[in-house]
Image (cartoon, rainbow, N blue to C red):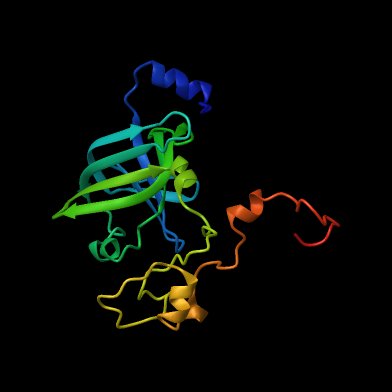
């Protein structure tokens, strides 16, 4: 549950219109940019929020349970730090995003309303549309490798190591990698992993002396 200062809560309930949105974007290389839809620079937590996004709309959806929430915004992208070149180079991909509702008369009165990651920015002229993914989406991101007898590399990619494989196919088995492509050293599976038959098999009916099956 979000905690709101009592005086700020009273101001919000009174219908006061002295609040604005502030967006803090943190790139993975450490660059931090603050943008606000207010007309003047606001500063808090050692970050200056410059007038940089004239948002025509902002939509936030908080999903229930463990489903990832999403947010989107579109408007005119004015912030100097968010250059078209950096966007095209993917430098803002997975940048951490914090969205605050702030009282521009007293910036100590603020609340963090949404946090997540910048997923995609589509730019058309001086207009942009940004898609943001909530922290819940991290629970759906694959981590690590699937342990399998079969190879998980794609034929001809960097992990496979083979080149000039046009028109050929691979069934991902170790025997094929070794005997057909002579590429056993780059096999990206676990060919000696015990199968389900070994896991489900019981002890031998006779000669069960505690040794091998």
Q: Residue furthest left?
A: 125
Look at 34% across and 45% down and name the residue there: 132
Horizontal and vertical percent position of residue 190:
56, 66
Horizontal and vertical percent position of residue 69:
39, 36
Q: Is residue 135 left or right of residue 73?
A: right
Horizontal and vertical percent position of residue 12:
40, 21
The residue lying toward the viewer, choosing from 213 and 124, is 213
Q: Is residue 203 left or right of residue 166?
A: right
Whether residue 27 can be seen here: yes
Q: Is 145 situated above or below 3? A: below
Q: Is 153 situated above or below 139? A: below
The residue lying toward the viewer, choosing from 153 and 4, is 153
Residue 22 sits in quarter: top left
Whether residue 38 can be seen here: no
Q: Is 4 situated above or below 155? A: above
Q: Which quadrant is the C terminus positioned in?
A: bottom right
Horizontal and vertical percent position of residue 134:
42, 41
Q: How many marks?
A: 0
Look at 47% across and 31% down and name the residue there: 109
The residue lying toward the viewer, choosing from 114 and 6, is 114
The residue lying toward the viewer, choosing from 89 and 83, is 89
Residue 159 sits in quarter: bottom left
Q: Residue furthest top?
A: 14
Q: Residue furthest front?
A: 206
Look at 59% across and 53% down and name the residue there: 196
């Amino acid at each position: 549950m979000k905690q709101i200062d009592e005086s700020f809560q009273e101001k919000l309930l009174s219908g006061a219109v002295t609040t604005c949105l502030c967006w803090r974007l943190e790139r993975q290389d450490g660059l931090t940019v603050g943008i606000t839809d207010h007309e003047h620079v606001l500063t808090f937590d050692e970050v200056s929020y410059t007038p940089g996004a004239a948002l025509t709309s902002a939509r936030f959806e908080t999903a229930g349970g463990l489903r990832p929430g999403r947010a989107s915004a579109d408007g005119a992208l004015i912030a100097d730090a968010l250059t078209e070149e950096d966007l095209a180079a993917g430098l803002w991909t997975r940048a951490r995003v914090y969205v605050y509702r702030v009282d521009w008369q007293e910036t100590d009165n603020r609340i963090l309303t949404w946090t997540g990651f910048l997923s995609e920015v589509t730019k058309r002229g001086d207009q942009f549309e940004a898609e943001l993914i909530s922290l819940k989406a991290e629970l759906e991101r694959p981590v690590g490798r699937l342990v399998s007898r079969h190879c998980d590399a794609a034929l001809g990619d960097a992990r496979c190591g083979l080149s000039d494989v046009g028109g050929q196919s691979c069934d991902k088995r170790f025997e094929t990698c070794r005997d057909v492509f002579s590429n056993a050293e780059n096999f990206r599976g676990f060919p000696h992993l015990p199968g389900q038959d070994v896991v489900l098999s019981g002890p031998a009916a006779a000669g069960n002396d505690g040794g091998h099956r």
